[in-house]
């Protein structure tokens, strides 16, 4: 089913010190040669995998070594890398927020409150639906993000994950998972900024994966900031785009300081602003509720 996915790890058969065969987990860069079929398998099931050595494209782009499945093969039903198993498990846990249609998983976002002031770009996730529903939605989104974290590149696996939400007109709309959930340091961050600049308050929420780094404080917020390395102004390559996650400096708000993970998932509406006197645009996601942040 999955044709283009690239995996982070595999199990390699080696000969141990006792002369017997044993399996070890390896990264693509740790595999010296191309193992025979059957000597390199998935970390979660016996399906054979293959290593493609690093190479340089005609354009000069270097492609690092990667792991993939052989054609016409798939993971075992109980494998933790089987997306159909993920579908079933999530639907059983959260039947109100997950549906499966034609083998595609749909994550349903709870209805959101529409602001009467249509000039405002400030929206609060959770205005529509209750905290329990949003918590279930966030738990499902976190489970999917953790599942995809096992891949170097999910490839066409992302075609099996969709988001269903109610837009500003009250109509049911659909978007791809990659448009909803993305790395802070990625081209998708710039795409979200473009949607926010175009649609304002009508922009649906996003789930952003932030690397955990040094926390800073302003007069009113605690925050982490990431340079996306994207350029929001095509005619000015010096203009930078930063992405940040922030929480108010209240005595009972310590979500950003109590993180024990190398990355977090943040669900919310972004807002953007330009720095005074500097060529910087900042896209910020503010945490107002506990369920908006999860460790990955």
Image (cartoon, grey):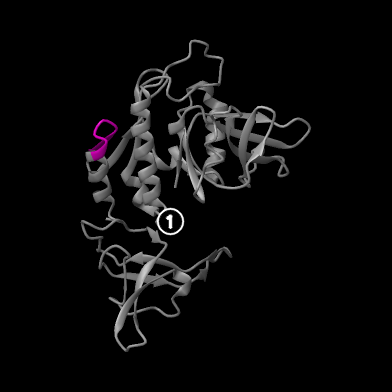
Say above or below: 115 vs 96.
Answer: above
- Does the magenta-highlighted stretch encompass residue 143? no
- Viewer-proximal residue among 227 and 174: 227
Q: Residue at x 60, y 47 (%)?
A: 213
Furthest residue to the bottom?
Answer: 19
Does the image show residue 177?
yes
- Viewer-proximal residue among 231 and 87: 87
- Viewer-proximal residue among 92 and 99: 92
* First to last magenta residue range: 93-101
Residue 178 place in picture, x, y as percent: 43, 43
- Does the magenta-highlighted stretch encompass residue 97? yes
- Looking at the rendered structure, the secondary structure element under dot 1 is strand
Say above or below: 76 vs 243.
Answer: below
Q: Quadrant of the N terminus?
A: bottom left
Residue 32 place in picture, x, y as percent: 45, 79
Image-based side of 174 in relation to 60, left or right:
left
- Viewer-proximal residue among 134 and 178: 134
Residue 176 place in picture, x, y as percent: 39, 39
Image-based side of 217 in relation to 43, left or right:
right
Say above or below: 112 vs 88.
Answer: above
Furthest residue to the front?
Answer: 251
Q: Residue at x 26, y 64 (%)?
A: 45
Residue 202 place in picture, x, y as percent: 48, 22
**Residue receiving disc 1:** 153
């Amino acid at each position: 089913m999955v044709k283009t996915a690239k995996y982070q790890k595999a199990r390699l058969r080696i000969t141990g010190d006792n002369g017997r065969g044993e399996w070890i987990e390896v990264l693509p860069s740790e595999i010296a040669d191309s193992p025979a079929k059957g000597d390199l398998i998935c970390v979660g099931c016996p399906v054979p995998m293959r290593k493609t050595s690093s190479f340089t494209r005609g354009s000069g782009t270097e492609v690092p070594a990667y792991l993939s499945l052989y054609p016409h093969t798939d993971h075992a039903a109980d494998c933790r890398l089987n997306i159909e198993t993920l579908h079933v498990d999530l639907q059983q846990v959260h039947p109100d927020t997950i549906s499966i249609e034609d083998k595609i998983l749909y994550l349903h976002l709870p209805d959101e409150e529409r602001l009467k002031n249509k000039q405002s770009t400030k929206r609060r996730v959770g205005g529509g639906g209750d905290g329990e529903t949003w918590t279930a939605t966030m738990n499902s989104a976190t489970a999917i993000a953790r599942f995809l974290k096992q891949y170097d590149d999910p490839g066409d696996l992302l075609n099996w994950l969709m988001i269903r939400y109610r837009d500003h007109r009250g109509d049911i709309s659909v978007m791809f998972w990659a448009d909803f959930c993305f790395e802070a340091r990625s081209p998708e961050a710039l795409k979200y900024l473009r949607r926010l600049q175009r649609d304002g308050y009508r922009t649906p929420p996003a789930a952003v994966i932030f690397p955990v780094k040094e926390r800073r404080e302003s007069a009113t917020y605690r925050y982490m900031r990431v340079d996306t390395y994207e350029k929001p102004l095509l005619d000015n390559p010096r203009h930078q785009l930063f992405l940040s996650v922030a929480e108010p400096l209240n005595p009972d708000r310590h979500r950003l300081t109590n993180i024990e993970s190398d990355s977090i998932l943040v669900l919310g509406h972004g807002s953007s602003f330009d720095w005074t006197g500097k060529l910087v645009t900042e896209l910020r996601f503010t945490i107002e509720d506990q369920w908006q942040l999860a460790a990955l």
